[in-house]
Image (cartoon, grey):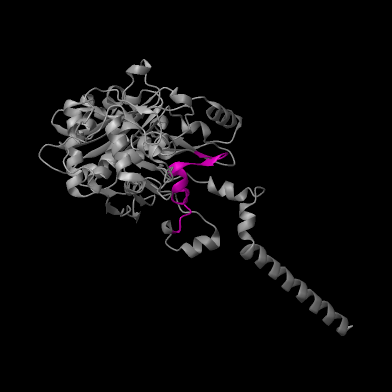
């Protein structure tokens, strides 16, 4: 009898040990897989059981939370949703997150260990701290000026503070209302399908995720390469350039929209945007020199984050001389995001120094206590200060005497470069109108802002579309708002 009780007790003990081992296995080793299982609703319920932290612009929340009364209790809400959608992105209970809502999700959801006094206790109890706050670098006046300037036309604006890299405006148009994606009902599914099926692609962030042929705005990079390589030593000297220019190894004759480009100086060619001069300079500098200069300005960088990822701008590194000539005027396979071209303008304005752009100034907890300061972005010298000064002189000349007159701002020194980029099969698409610029007050050499604008569907006859006519006024409005 006693022997049987002992056997039963030993067996029960073994069962208890097996139960404890299995519990440890489930709770410790396999917790992650169970948490990630689509069948596990507890994680989603816990995630939306408290309000989400706010994204702030100039200290004012542009996001919030609303109580739905459902099991997934709190849904995301947005103030001025279409205006700030290219910054915030969306946070959807059904379709996840994008842009800042994704990049800063742990902070906003309250799961970031930095928000907890005792992170180990939160991990043990699986509790969430109140969502933190993400303070952006956006200037609301400049954001509104850019948004109003585009007026619903397809295009984008990016504005940077050249010295610090702070992104002051980031607009993509047409935009959308991210709040319609917040919940989890049939209305959200319908809104998602409609937005993704829309011909004008309102959910595409054209400032960060779309690359365009930069057209003549890329001539800033080509001019920098020509000056840095010594191919041009005097911006006022003739360049011995023919008009038209026969592309190397072909019978294709490249012409100009402007007159007086034959043998024009670099400064004259920059003002008149002479394709022949810059195509020939690109060939003279050579593929390696052009690719190196493009890379210095940020092209072909696949690691750029602001903290959302930015589509890499492209300058091909395997081309024949004719293709190099076309790439030097921002055509062929060259493509850039508006943010990239704002970086080009910023580097020129900042004495040749390029500071990596960023969008988040700091992160605080729900009570406003600092959790993480803003980044300390790297600054690198991409061109010599003397080269930058010559480029500044030429860009100012474009605004004062060339096609950029509509970007002039009273009381400011403004430099700019126009661009009209052909695209589509046989270049049949509506040309993109570009303008990049920078501005500073007359009593200082420190620039206040650098801007890039692209308009995809300029409302004009094809021959009348120009960066100076359609994009420059938008840049002017943004620079005026920066004062």
- Identify which residue is drawn at 54% across, 60% down: 125
Rendered location of residue 444, percent (x, y): 12, 42
- Can I make out residue 324 in this image? yes
Residue 73 location, x and y as percent? 54, 41
- Asked if residue 67 lies left or right of residue 268, the reply is right
| Residue beneath the point at 32% across and 17% down | 464
Q: Residue at x 36, y 15 (%)?
A: 461
Considering only vertical position in the picture, is 129 above or below 324?
below
Would residue 95 be counted in the magenta stretch? yes
Residue 450 as seen in the image, left or right of residue 34: left
- Let me know if residue 205 is in the magenta part: no
Of 113 and 199, which appears nearest the observer?
199
Furthest residue to the bottom?
A: 3
Q: Which quadrant of the view contains residue 440?
A: top left
Q: Residue at x 27, y 38 (%)?
A: 220
Q: Which residues are magenta?
A: 91-113
Q: Residue 77 or 228: which is nearer the viewer?
A: 228
Query: Can the viewer see residue 336 in this picture?
Result: no
The spot of residue 424 in percent (x, y) is 46, 27
Provide residue 37's location: percent of width, then percent of height: 65, 51
Left or right of 392: which side holds 255?
Answer: right
Quadrant position of residue 433: top left
15 and 170: which is toward the camera: 170
Task: Assign the N terminus to one quadrant of the image.
Answer: bottom right
The residue positioned farthest toward the top in the image shown: 461
């Amino acid at each position: 009898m006693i022997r049987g009780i002992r056997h039963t007790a030993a067996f029960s003990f073994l069962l208890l040990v097996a139960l404890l081992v299995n519990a440890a296995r489930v709770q410790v080793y396999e917790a992650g897989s169970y948490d990630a299982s689509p069948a596990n609703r507890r994680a989603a319920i816990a995630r939306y059981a408290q309000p989400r932290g706010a994204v702030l612009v100039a200290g004012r929340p542009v996001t919030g939370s609303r109580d739905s009364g459902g099991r997934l209790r709190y849904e995301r809400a947005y103030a001025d949703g279409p205006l700030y959608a290219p910054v915030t992105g969306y946070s959807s209970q059904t379709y996840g997150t994008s842009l800042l809502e994704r990049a800063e999700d742990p902070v906003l959801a309250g799961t970031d260990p930095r928000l907890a006094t005792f992170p180990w206790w939160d991990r043990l109890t699986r509790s969430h701290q109140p969502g933190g706050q993400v303070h952006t670098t956006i200037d609301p006046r400049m954001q509104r000026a850019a948004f109003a300037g585009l007026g619903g036309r397809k295009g984008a604006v990016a504005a940077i503070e050249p010295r610090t890299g702070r992104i002051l405006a980031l607009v993509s148009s047409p935009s959308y209302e991210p709040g319609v994606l917040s919940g989890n009902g049939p209305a959200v599914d319908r809104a998602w399908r409609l937005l993704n099926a829309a011909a004008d692609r309102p959910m595409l962030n054209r400032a960060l995720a779309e690359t365009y042929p930069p057209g003549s705005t890329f001539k800033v990079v080509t001019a920098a390469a020509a000056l840095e390589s010594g191919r041009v030593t005097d911006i006022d000297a003739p360049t011995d350039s023919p008009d038209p220019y026969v592309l190397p190894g072909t019978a294709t004759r490249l012409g100009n929209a402007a007159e007086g480009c034959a043998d024009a100086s670099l400064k004259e060619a920059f003002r008149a945007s002479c394709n022949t001069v810059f195509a020939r300079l690109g060939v003279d500098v050579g593929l390696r020199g052009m690719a190196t200069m493009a890379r210095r300005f940020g092209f072909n960088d696949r690691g750029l984050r602001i903290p959302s990822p930015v589509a890499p701008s492209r300058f091909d590194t395997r081309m024949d001389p004719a293709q190099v000539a076309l790439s030097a005027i921002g055509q062929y396979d060259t493509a850039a995001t508006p943010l990239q071209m704002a970086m080009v303008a910023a580097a020129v304005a900042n004495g040749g120094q390029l500071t990596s752009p960023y969008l988040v100034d700091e992160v605080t907890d729900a009570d406003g206590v600092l959790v993480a300061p803003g980044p300390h972005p790297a600054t690198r010298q991409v061109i010599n200060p003397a080269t930058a000064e010559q480029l500044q002189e030429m860009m100012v000349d474009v605004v004062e005497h060339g096609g950029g007159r509509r970007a002039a701002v009273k009381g400011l020194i403004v430099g700019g470069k126009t661009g009209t980029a052909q695209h589509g099969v046989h270049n049949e698409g509506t040309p993109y109108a570009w303008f990049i610029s920078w501005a500073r007050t007359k009593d200082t050499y420190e620039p206040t802002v650098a801007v890039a604008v692209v308009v995809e569907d300029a409302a004009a006859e094809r021959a009348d579309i120009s960066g100076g006519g359609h994009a420059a006024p938008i840049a002017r409005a943004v620079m005026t708002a920066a004062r």
